[in-house]
Image: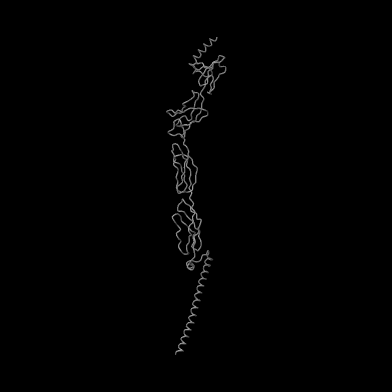
């Protein structure tokens, strides 16, 4: 009986390779790295009729002979592994082509990409056919070329005579040099094949200089002195009456901002009140000052006049006494000798 079964099995194994493609497998499994065992199976054969020492592990089509003398045709299929392919933004022309693309997947696999002449992506290693690496995208022409983004926060500086230099985090990249006050939108000059410099804003504020000008003044009725120099212009409040007027300063350069911290007034001084009154009527703003000044000057005039009058009276009295004395001497001389 056993001989008969053996003959049948041999004949069956000889016929299977010819008809395997026309038959449907009884069982199908995905590769797991473990043995695929069929219940009650006592022997396993390859599709070519080779007897295996144990249940198969690798992918392929197999035959199981059970203790019930049943023949079961089963297969182990490659495990499908989705792989996302992206461009390596750190890759440069001098680097290996194998490093040009990056692969993202779940699991611990080691394989290398192979790009054929049409740009299709394949795996150089498939672990004896046990894995089916499914690349997405399938062609390198569909892989988006990524660039390294270079960002920089918006910054604010105070003007410097040497200019403002802004540096990138990437070595050997020329810094951006800005010289004048203003608002700028800038980006670093990088190799556009590999980098994308995101524009950012730079604000340069004027440099503040504390100003201590000389006291500025004029006498009433005079022309204003020149209130301008090479760097800034002084401007006073309007008005021509005696008094103080607020001074403001305007820079001739947008890079500087001046701030007056001393002598921030322009003064008009009174010197010729009578002439001022003849030229222009008194201003209500300075009535008290004008009145005070007029009073003081009048007192001085009266005092001087008083001194002159007393001097004339004293001189006339002495002259009269001398004249009378001289006449008396002459009279006595004549009376005595004549």
Eyeballing the image, is 250 above or below 3? below
Give the colouring mode of the picture.
one colour
Expressed as whole percent of the image width and height from the top left, the position of residue 275 reads: 47, 68
Count of marks overlaid on the render: 0
- In which quadrant will I find the C terminus? bottom left
Q: Residue at the bottom extreme? A: 338
Expressed as whole percent of the image width and height from the top left, the position of residue 45 reads: 51, 16
Expressed as whole percent of the image width and height from the top left, the position of residue 38 reads: 56, 18
Eyeballing the image, is 152 above or below 337? above
- In which quadrant will I find the N terminus? top right
Q: Residue 309 or 42: which is nearer the viewer?
A: 309
Q: Residue 315 or 53: which is nearer the viewer?
A: 315
Eyeballing the image, is 48 above or below 242? above
Expressed as whole percent of the image width and height from the top left, the position of residue 223 reads: 45, 62
């Amino acid at each position: 009986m056993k001989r008969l079964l053996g003959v049948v099995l041999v004949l069956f194994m000889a016929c299977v390779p010819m008809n395997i493609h026309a038959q449907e497998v009884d069982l199908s499994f995905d590769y797991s790295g473990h043995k695929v065992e069929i219940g009650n199976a006592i022997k396993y054969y390859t599709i070519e009729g080779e007897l295996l020492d144990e249940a198969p592990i690798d992918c392929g089509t197999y035959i199981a002979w059970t203790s019930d003398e049943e023949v079961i045709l089963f297969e182990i299929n490659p495990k499908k592994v989705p792989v996302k392919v992206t461009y390596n933004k750190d890759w440069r022309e001098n680097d290996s082509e194998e490093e040009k693309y990056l692969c993202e997947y779940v699991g611990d696999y080691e394989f290398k990409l192979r790009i054929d002449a049409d740009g299709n992506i394949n795996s150089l290693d498939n672990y004896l056919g046990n894995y089916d690496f499914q690349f997405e995208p399938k062609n390198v022409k569909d892989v988006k070329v990524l660039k390294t983004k270079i960002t920089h926060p918006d910054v604010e500086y105070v003007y410097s005579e040497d200019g403002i230099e802004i540096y990138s985090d990437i070595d050997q990249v020329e810094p951006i040099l800005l010289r004048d006050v203003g608002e700028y939108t800038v980006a670093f000059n990088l190799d556009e094949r590999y980098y994308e410099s995101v524009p950012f804003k730079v604000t340069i504020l004027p440099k503040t200089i504390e100003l201590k000008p000389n006291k500025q003044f004029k006498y009433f009725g005079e022309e204003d002195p020149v209130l301008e120099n090479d760097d800034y212009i002084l401007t006073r409040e309007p008005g021509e009456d005696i008094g103080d007027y607020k001074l403001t300063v305007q820079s001739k350069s947008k890079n500087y901002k001046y701030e007056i911290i001393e002598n921030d007034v322009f003064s008009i001084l009174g010197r010729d009140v009578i002439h001022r009154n003849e030229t222009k009527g008194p201003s209500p703003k300075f009535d008290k000052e004008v009145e005070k000044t007029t009073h003081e000057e009048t007192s001085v005039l009266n005092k001087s006049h008083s001194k002159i009058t007393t001097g004339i009276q004293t001189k006339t009295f002495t002259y009269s006494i001398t004249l009378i004395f001289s006449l008396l001497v002459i009279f006595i001389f004549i009376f005595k000798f004549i």
